[in-house]
Image (cartoon, rainbow, N blue to C red):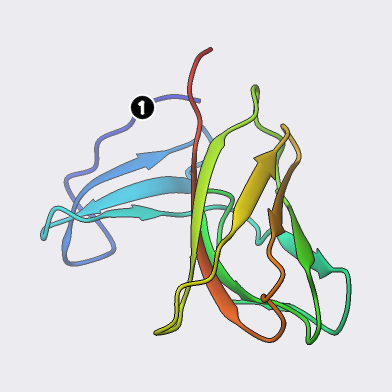
Amino acid sequence: NLFRAYDNLTAPDSILVVASNSGTAMFTIASSGHVISKNDGIPTIACTAGSPTIETGSTDVAGEFTAGAAATACTLTFKKPWTTAPACMGAADSATGIALGIQTTTTTAVFNSATMGAVSFNYICIGFNN
């Protein structure tokens, strides 16, 4: 990948876009200062029960999924493998706190909880050198 700076950005509130050699945006910094992850594909989600869904716009870096009814674990399979397992954090998108464990590999993040069925979860994963 190559760093490219654009002075004629297609998104009107972007101040920086980092893209691959092919021009695919990897992430954007908006004029608000917010970092917006972009990707050329959505990861997949599978749970121990029910029919989970993943939100459009989710990426390997950040997103949201809804666990299948009665699920106790859900596996997010990254669209592209990481070089080393990323550090991931997640939280239920609800008023009540739900204890959530997350184990990662270079290809998956597994979310575990006794009470995750039909609840939406937000996640963020960041790579690091270890």
**Camera-side residue: 33 or 104?**
104
Q: For residue 45, what is the image quadrant?
A: bottom right
What amino acid type should be assigned to the residue bearing mark 1? Answer: Phe
**Camera-side residue: 16 or 109?**
109
Identify whether 7 is placed above or below 96: above
Identify the residue at horizontal 83%, vertical 67% (top origin). 46
Q: Mark 1 sits on what residue?
A: 3
**Camera-side residue: 58 or 88?**
88
Spot occupied by residue 31 in the image (x, y as percentages of width and height) = 11, 58
Element carrying mark 1:
loop
Identify the residue at horizontal 65%, vertical 62% (top origin). 42
Question: Is residue 4 visible to us here?
Answer: yes
Spot occupied by residue 111 in the image (x, y as percentages of width and height) = 68, 57
Q: Residue furthest top?
A: 130
Spot occupied by residue 8 in the image (x, y as percentages of width and height) = 20, 52
Identify whether 92 is placed above or below 22: below
Question: Is residue 56 visible to us here?
Answer: no
Spot occupied by residue 130 in the image (x, y as percentages of width and height) = 53, 12
Q: Is residue 15 left or right of residue 5?
A: left
Identify whether 90 is placed above or below 1: below
Q: Residues within 10 Å of mark 1 (few under 14, many from 20)?
A: few
